[in-house]
Image (cartoon, rainbow, N blue to C red):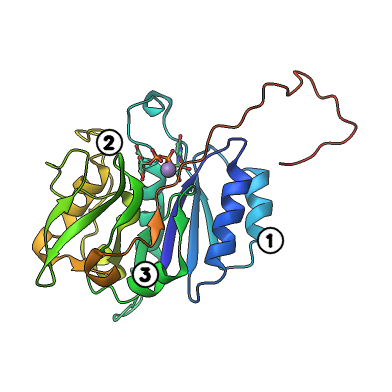
Amino acid sequence: IYAITPTYSRPVQKAELTRLANTFRQVSRLHWILVEDAAARSELVTRFVAGAGLPCTHLHVPTPRRYKRPGLPRATEQRNAGLAWLRQRHQHLPPPQPGVLFFADDDNTYSLELFQEMRTTRKVSVWPVGLVGGRRYERPVVENGKVVGWYTGWRADRPFAIDMAGFAVSLQVILSHPKAVFKRRGSQPGMQESDFLKQITTVEELEPKANNCTKVLVWHTRTEKVNLANEPKYHLDTVNIEV
Ligand code: UGA
Ligand code: MN
């Protein structure tokens, strides 16, 4: 399993990455592709990766300033950098190349069972996501083992009404669709997932996981912005501490 995680510098970054590593460390044969939204690798993430205790590739690419605005899709360039690295790594290896790719945002909560489910992905698999879309959960609606619609409270007209945390793609599909990427141009807010999936699969082809999409195994948790109201303007402590 390859997990691509975009991440950016903010007060909670190390805490988020710590939570994630504590989960991923328990998943066998997982390779973490951590992509910093930055012009260079930061010392904090570099140190973190060195001590993470799991196979890890540390990349970086900055989001152009013009795209750092509320309402615009996040982490487009970072996920594409992860995809490019993956394609490069596997392009000269002979098939079959078993593998599953999953986009793991740094603030979500992942059960270990989720990884057992996605491991058997043949092309593209899907499952419910908790705490998203203004509801307790969103899920693909399944009939006779096939996805026939979407239970969602937000933009049900999306061709694939699913969050980034709700699907996995086999490595084979990633390699056989070398041009499939996340797009800035023409992509509306919240349409990144749908726009990407459109390039590689059809709704009919989707493989429902998590007991025909009736179990929530991943949560779109979002971390509260920390209160730093009492943080001094200038360094006051006698030591420099990484948080
Ligand atoms: C929702 C979806 O769950 C995301 O997959 C999607 O990328 C995002 O919307 C979007 O609008 O594009 P949300 O919780 O609103 O997620 O987004 P964040 O968790 O703030 O960001 C998603 C990922 O991108 C995180 O891993 C975060 O660390 C990273 N990110 C965010 C950056 O790398 N740079 C940024 O400037 C912001
Ligand atoms: Mn998030």
Label 1: element kind: loop
Name the spot of residue 227 as percent of width and height, x first: 63, 28
Of callouts 3 and 2, which one flags the residue occurring earlier in the amino acid sequence? 3
Residue 70 picture quarter: top left
Tell me, for residue 188, which label it has, or none. Answer: none
In this rendering, which labeled residue sits more in front, label 3 or label 2? 2
Q: Name above or below for residue 239 compared with residue 78.
A: above
**What residue is shown with label 3?**
90
Identify the residue shown where x is 59% and y is 43%.
13
The CA span between labels 1 and 3 is 26 Å
- Amino acid type at mark 2: Arg
Q: Name above or below for residue 113 compared with residue 78.
A: below
Identify the residue shown where x is 21% and y is 66%.
176
Residue projecting furthest to the top: 233
Whether residue 3 sits left or right of residue 189 in the image: it is right
Tell me, for residue 51, which label it has, or none. Answer: 1
- Amino acid type at mark 1: Gly
Image quadrant where one finds the N terminus:
bottom left
Name the spot of residue 219 as percent of width and height, x first: 40, 53
Q: Name above or below for residue 230 compared with residue 213.
A: above
Name the spot of residue 156 as percent of width and height, x first: 15, 42
